[in-house]
Image (tube, helix red, strand yellow):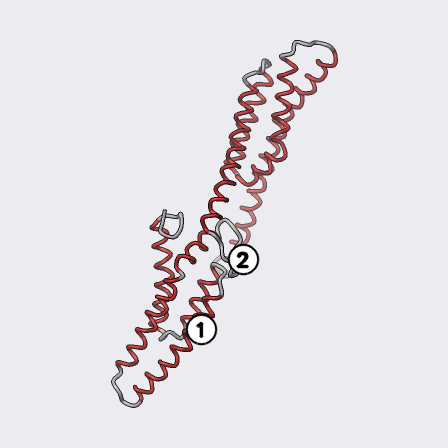
Amino acid sequence: MGWFTRRSNSWEIKNSLILLGVVGGISFISFGVLTPIAIAVFGRIVNVNRWFWHSCVIALVYLFFLILALFFLVADVDSVYVLAVNFISFYIYVVYMSLDLGEYLQRLDLQNIISLEKNKEYNYDAVISQYNSVQSDSQSTKDEFIYKLEYWKNKLAKPELIKSVDEIIRLTNIIITKDDHASDLFFLRHGSSIVNVLQQYVELDSSYISNPTVIGTKQSLEQVIIQSRVIFENELSNLIEMKVLEVDSEASVYISVLKGRGIL
């Protein structure tokens, strides 16, 4: 965990050096004139524009002293005034952005999990905790689903049904691995229904009641369990097809770009 975020120290150091290095470098090279533009670019990355306006105010004040320093230079006064103003511009912008460094790093991290609103303040720890809680709940739901499948499978007697449930478990793990977001929608559509069918079947099978109604219901539930495997297979096939389409689309765009540049 870093100083400002829950990311690593190396991640914070790298992004801090990028921010302060670029801002400081442009300040020094351009005598602070172009620094507000650099700050605006970083502000846009994390959806904050007030830094740009603050830097513009700083730039106006700095510009006054720069003109004054140039006046001394033209008046054949020691050029140390110009150099001093240049160094001041370097330090003043770096110090200013250092004051907002924590917010920049936090928003840079948050943009990976939420859509940031312009200039809106966020409680970093609260957002991260809520996100982790949702992720944990989602993972717990999937683990619980697989656990219930295993539980009811162990109570089945027919090899065909056991084989179907084993295949459902295998396909479930593949779907989770392929696309975590798609698996959330998948569990929402099918999870509780399949578990309920298994539970009802096991309860009827263990009741030892053999009247025509119970037998007919059990046969219907058996068909549902077997067909559920087909449903899972179709879901996985659709997921793979979507991935293939995405890859094909990206490949087509890439080839078009290469052709446009005359490389192909």
Kind of element beneath mark 1:
helix
Please name the residue shown 45% across and 66% down the image. 51
Closer to us: 263 or 224: 224
Q: Position of residue 201 (x, y in %)?
A: 64, 18
- Residue 219, quarter of the rendered image: top right
Name the amino acid, label 2.
Answer: Glu
Kind of element beneath mark 2:
loop
Q: Position of residue 217 (x, y in %)?
A: 71, 17
Closer to us: 158 or 152: 152
Q: Which residue is mark 1?
A: 56
Please name the residue shown 47% across and 70% down the image. 53
Q: Position of residue 109 (x, y in %)?
A: 44, 52
Marks 1 and 2, how far apart in space? Answer: 22 Å
- 171 in relation to 21, above or below: above
Q: Position of residue 204 (x, y in %)?
A: 66, 15
- 168 in relation to 99, above or below: above
Please name the residue shown 65% across and 11% down the image. 207
- Residue 230, quarter of the rendered image: top right
Please name the residue shown 57% across and 23% down the image. 165
Name the amino acid, label 1.
Answer: Cys
Q: Residue furthest right?
A: 212
The disc at residue 117 is 2
